[in-house]
Image: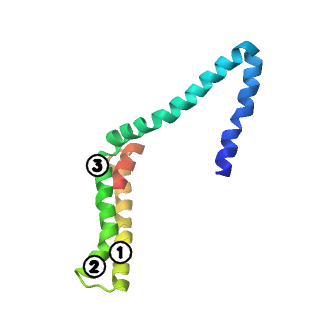
């Protein structure tokens, strides 16, 4: 948060300096209110843009993560209660589940580069699965 505030705060003195040199005292209030509106607009548009991005770029990704988090949350319980694994054994099984995905992710990246003429969107889409 310190670096975030520092980076965002660096723009304010430059903005004030520009306002003083470009606009008269009678215009500054109006111009600053326009700048204030852009801040409100940008904060307000984040929600609809997020929803739009979800529908455009991640309809399938969301469902994959529903399954993934279902496995993450229920696999240890299933292994203990249904398959009668001990707590230690179910923990190791879950550990192996996560690491078993590594070769698949690497293979998907290689396939994306060599067979699907990779672009950033295709790479991200392909390796999320």
Q: Callout 3: few (<14), some (14-19), or many (20+) C-alpha neighbours within 10 Å?
A: some
Name the residue beneath numbered marker 1: 94
Out of 27 and 90, give the one closest to the viewer: 27
In front: mark 2 or mark 1? 2
Q: Mark 2 or 1 closer to N-term? A: 2
Which one is nearer the viewer's eye here, 103 or 38? 38
Q: Is 113 positioned to the left or the right of 82 in the image?
A: right
Corner quadrant of residue 71: bottom left
> Local crowd at mark 2 within 10 Å, few (<14), some, or many (≥20)?
some
Q: Position of residue 95 (x, y in %)?
A: 39, 75
Which element is circle 3 on? Answer: helix
How far apart in space, not on screen, are marks 1 and 3 (Cα)?
A: 24 Å
> Is label 2 in a helix, a strand or a loop?
helix
Q: Earlier in the sequence, mark 1 or mark 3?
A: 3
- Where does label 3 land, which residue? 60
Residue that protrudes farthest toward the left in the picture: 82
Mark 2 or mark 3: name the one nearer the start of the chain: 3
Query: Would residue 24 be seen by someone viewing this image from the given angle?
Result: no
Residue corresponding to mark 2: 79
Up-down relation of residue 75 to residue 81 (above or below): above
- Gap between marks 2 and 1, in whole Å? 9 Å
Depth check: give the residue in front, 16 or 99.
16
Give the quadrant of residue 97. bottom left
Q: What is the quadrant of the C terminus in the image?
A: bottom left
Residue in view at x 28 percent, y 60 percent: 67
Does the CB distance between marks 1 and 3 fall below 8 Å? Answer: no
Where does the image place residue 33, in percent across and percent down from the top left?
Answer: 62, 22
């Amino acid at each position: 948060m310190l670096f975030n505030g520092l980076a965002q705060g660096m723009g304010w003195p430059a903005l004030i300096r520009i306002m003083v040199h470009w606009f008269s005292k009678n215009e500054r209030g109006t111009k600053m209110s326009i700048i204030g509106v852009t801040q409100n607009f940008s904060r307000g548009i984040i929600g609809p843009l997020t929803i739009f991005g979800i529908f455009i770029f991640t309809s399938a990704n969301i469902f994959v993560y529903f399954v993934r988090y279902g496995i993450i949350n229920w696999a240890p319980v299933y292994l203990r209660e249904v398959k009668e694994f001990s707590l230690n054994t179910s923990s190791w099984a879950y550990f192996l589940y996560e690491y078993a995905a590594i070769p698949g992710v690497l293979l998907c990246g290689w396939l994306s580069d060599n067979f699907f003429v990779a672009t950033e969107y295709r790479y991200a889409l392909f390796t999320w699965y």
